[in-house]
Image (cartoon, helix red, strand yellow):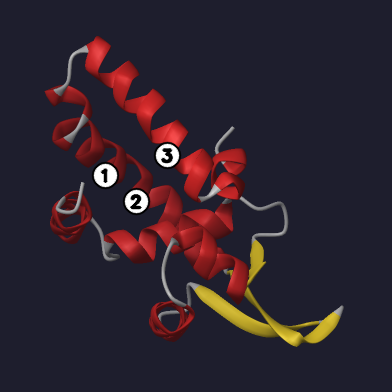
Amino acid sequence: MTWLPAALDTRLAQDSDVGHVEYQVLRWLSRTPEQALHMSRLADTASVTPSHLSRIVARLEKRGMVSRTPDPADGRYTLARLTDLGARTVADTEDAYGAAVRDLVLARLTPEQLRGLGDAAATLLGHIKPECLAAHR
């Protein structure tokens, strides 16, 4: 599992203009009703440190895919918000990302292995990051 993100990054570089971790950040934002999250929550959800997320979002912001604004309800927090270009990037990248996951993971495992992997992943995620597991249901 350590090498999978790097392999996905390589595939996405061939088929899209975002890397794996950038796509994950954009995708998490696209899954929220307002297409926005507090930076601290986004860092936790995307499984990166706040400083790493800040660099990722700065790159995405420079490319016009994300904007950052103070939270109007509480100015102590910063909201990362998906832009229209970011939403299109998620939609355009989804097929390439899905194809990479199918080729690198799903096509390599039997149905029984896939069920076992899914069960094991859900168990581990439920223990390590239950809020992320809930977001995937």
**Foreground: 128 or 114?**
128
Q: Picture quarter containing residue 25?
A: bottom left
Residue carrying label 3: 124
Residue 33, visible in the rendered structure: yes
- 129 sits to left or right of 78: left
Circle 1 is placed at which residue position?
96
Q: Amino acid at mark 1?
A: Ala
Q: Residue sitting at 43 percent across and 62 percent down?
A: 47
Indicate the amino acid at tag 3: Leu
Residue at 19% from the left image edge and 33% from the top image edge:
105
In the rendered image, residue 22, in percent from the top left (x then y), is placed at 37, 66
Q: Is residue 36 left or right of residue 44?
A: right
Distance from the alpha carbon under mark 2 to that under mark 3: 28 Å
Q: Are marks 2 and 3 in contact (CB under 8 Å)?
A: no
Pointer 2 or 3: first along the chain? 2
The C terminus, quarter of image: top right
Q: Earlier in the sequence, mark 3 or mark 1?
A: 1
Q: Secondary structure at mark 2?
A: helix
Q: Are marks 1 and 2 in contact (CB under 8 Å)?
A: yes
Give the secondary structure at mark 1: helix
